[in-house]
Image (cartoon, grey):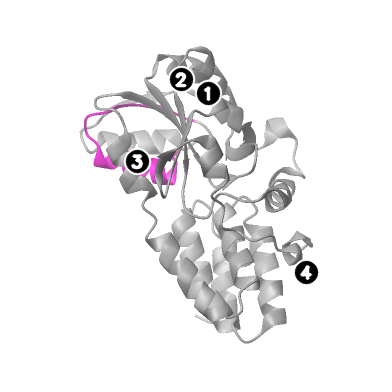
Amino acid sequence: MHPIEHLRYVARSSGVGQESLVRETAGALLSFGHDPAGLVTTCRRMIARQPSSGPLMWLASRVLTAADPRSEVRACMQAITEDKTARLLSRQLPVEAAVCVLGWPDLVGGTLRRRGDLRVLVVDVVGEGCHLAQRLSEQDGWVDEVAESGLGAAAASADLVLLETAAVGPDGFLAVSGSRAAAAVAQAAEVPVWLVAGKGTVLPGRMWDSLVERALGMVEAWEADEEVVPLALVDRVAGPDGLVSVAEAVSSTDCPVTPELFCAAI
């Protein structure tokens, strides 16, 4: 497939995990390593079509600010492929805990498949939770599928609420709609909330503001499939370096500020 056609295919994809999205995009970007103008335009277009992806913005920012874009593309591909978030989280979850999750989070879903001792309360938001519940049930796990109306009860009765994000900023993160309510209920019930944030999801303030504007700027908040959740509702962050404090996670960004990406796609 021609690189341009490959990028168009990736740009139109939905329901693709962040690792796959970054790897596919990075592979296609290799062909633009000697075309700086084409690289900028391509990165803008990809971000415009996948506006919720922090790792995609991380990839574009690193490549556009690199002295050798092709080498940086390969380094980003390696970093995203070697992300240890799911593996570390699997070791850190409490034994035989009741865990509440929303929808079908990619990293969390992979983690839960590694652990057969957990009771998983899967809240069926945006029509995805039922599919994760079915997949986990096939592996003889202890799974309860929860209707969206039971979100509050599930969060309050769990031992731990796990929320996954594709983008984190200085004071908030983007997550599936319903996450803010789940986190607020959990906090009120003194149930810990862990945020799962894989490689490339933590962005500096200006990049975060740009992402949120693209992802949510054209839709009413109550109609969106995603929402911004305050980091004040999170107790710990599970990421590539294991379980860390919120402050430590936010300060660990390796995404440069890239003004070229603030512009609208052509």
Which residue is disc 1 drawn over? 182
Does 201 lie within the magenta span? no
| Mark 1 and mark 3 residues within 8 Å of each other at the beta carbon | no
Measure how far apart labels 4 and 1 are at the Cα level: 38 Å
* For marks 3 and 4 on the same chain, the one whose residue lies earlier in the sequence: 3
Magenta-span inclusion, residue 114: yes
Place of residue 155 in the rendered image (x, y in percent of width and height, measured from the top left)? 46, 20
Q: Are marks 4 and 2 in contact (CB under 8 Å)?
A: no
Label located before the other in sequence (2 or 1): 2
Residue 219 horizontal side relative to residue 67, left or right: right
Secondary element type, mark 4 = loop
Q: Which residue is mark 4?
A: 266
- The numbered mark, 4 or 1, whose residue comes first in the sequence reads 1
The reply, left or right, for residue 264 in relation to residue 98 is right
- Mark 3 vs 2, N-terminal side: 3
Residue 28's spot in the image, x, y percent?
A: 53, 75
